[in-house]
């Protein structure tokens, strides 16, 4: 499996709104089969744009289509039900609401009662030990879960120097795995997870850009 070498920065995610120039993500696979990522326009050839800010703003969110983790029918009302919690968490931990919403979408499809086979719970699928360390008393409580999950994202972002892809990868595979491989771990689940979160982030960012809601 290919190990990803990532240089995408989360600095664009730490201020609202996200600057359009920082929204493009480029990818390049070298002769050794290693995939590289960057959010800076590469000067050399061979790079391909994986995500484009203009495309995202027009409603296109990447080349691939992703299915929500839990596969249940998308209910527009349910997707907005936790807006107040997401907005609160975004302001408290200085992360874009679209980014938090993308994590929730991929993790639980906005079902607060979701429980994984591994025991992860709630909207942001917190493991018991993670929930406890983030001060979450009741992981089934939507507000506590969103605040705890976003706090954990903030911890990971700080740990990996604001690197977007590493933050998302660590949320899925664990901090130690990302540190061990010095990049996205060579797990198909984690690679697909990172792509899916980016896909939904752009989609939700596009909605916010259109409606003016953050």
Image: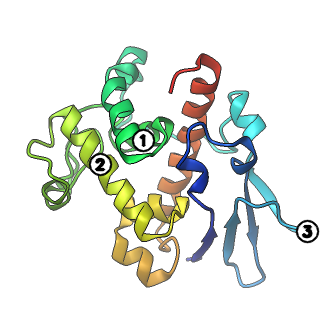
Quick one: label 2 or label 1, which is nearer the N terminus?
Answer: 1
In the image, is 204 to the left or to the right of 93? right
Q: Residue at horizontal 39%, vertical 20%? A: 80
Can you identify the residue that label 2 sits on? Answer: 149
Q: Nearer the viewer, residue 68 or 136?
A: 136
Q: Position of residue 190 (x, y in %)?
A: 45, 62
Dot 2 lies on which element?
A: helix
Q: Label 2 to label 1, Cα distance in Å?
A: 9 Å
Q: Position of residue 69 (x, y in %)?
A: 39, 42
Q: Position of residue 111 (x, y in %)?
A: 27, 31
Give the number of the disc on residue 100: 1
Q: Residue at horizontal 71%, vertical 59%? A: 39
Give the answer, above or below, for where 34 lies relative to 28: below
Q: Nearer the viewer, residue 130 or 31?
A: 130
Q: Label 1 to label 3, Cα distance in Å?
A: 33 Å
Give the answer, above or below, for where 31 lies relative to 135: below
1 or 3: mark nearer the eye: 1
Can you identify the residue that label 3 sits on? Answer: 45
Q: Quadrant of the N terminus?
A: bottom right
Q: Label 3: how many residues lie within 10 Å, few (<14), some (14-19) or many (20+)?
A: few
Marks 2,1: beta carbons within 8 A = yes
3 or 2: mark nearer the eye: 2
Q: Label 2: how many residues lie within 10 Å, few (<14), some (14-19) or many (20+)?
A: many
Q: Position of residue 97 (x, y in %)?
A: 46, 36
Q: Residue at horizontal 34%, vertical 47%? A: 150
């Amino acid at each position: 499996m290919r190990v990803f070498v990532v240089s995408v920065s989360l600095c664009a995610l730490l201020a609202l709104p996200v600057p359009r120039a920082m929204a493009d993500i480029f990818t390049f696979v070298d002769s050794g089969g290693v995939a590289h990522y960057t959010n800076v326009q590469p000067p050399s050839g061979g790079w391909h744009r994986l995500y484009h800010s203009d495309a995202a703003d027009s409603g296109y969110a990447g080349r691939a289509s992703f299915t929500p983790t839990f596969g249940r029918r998308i209910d527009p009302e349910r997707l907005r039900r936790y807006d107040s919690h997401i907005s609160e968490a975004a302001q408290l931990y200085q992360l874009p609401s679209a980014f938090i919403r993308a994590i929730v979408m991929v993790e639980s499809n906005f079902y607060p009662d979701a429980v994984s086979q591994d025991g992860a719970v709630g909207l942001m699928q917190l493991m018991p030990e993670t929930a406890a360390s983030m001060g979450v008393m009741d992981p089934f409580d939507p507000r506590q879960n969103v605040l705890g999950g976003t706090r954990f994202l903030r911890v990971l972002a700080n740990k990996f120097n604001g690197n977007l892809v590493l933050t998302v990868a660590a949320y899925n595979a664990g901090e130690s795995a990302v540190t061990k491989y010095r990049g996205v771990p060579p797990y198909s689940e984690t690679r697909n997870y990172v792509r899916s979160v980016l896909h939904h982030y752009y989609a939700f960012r596009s909605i916010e850009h259109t409606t003016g809601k953050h």
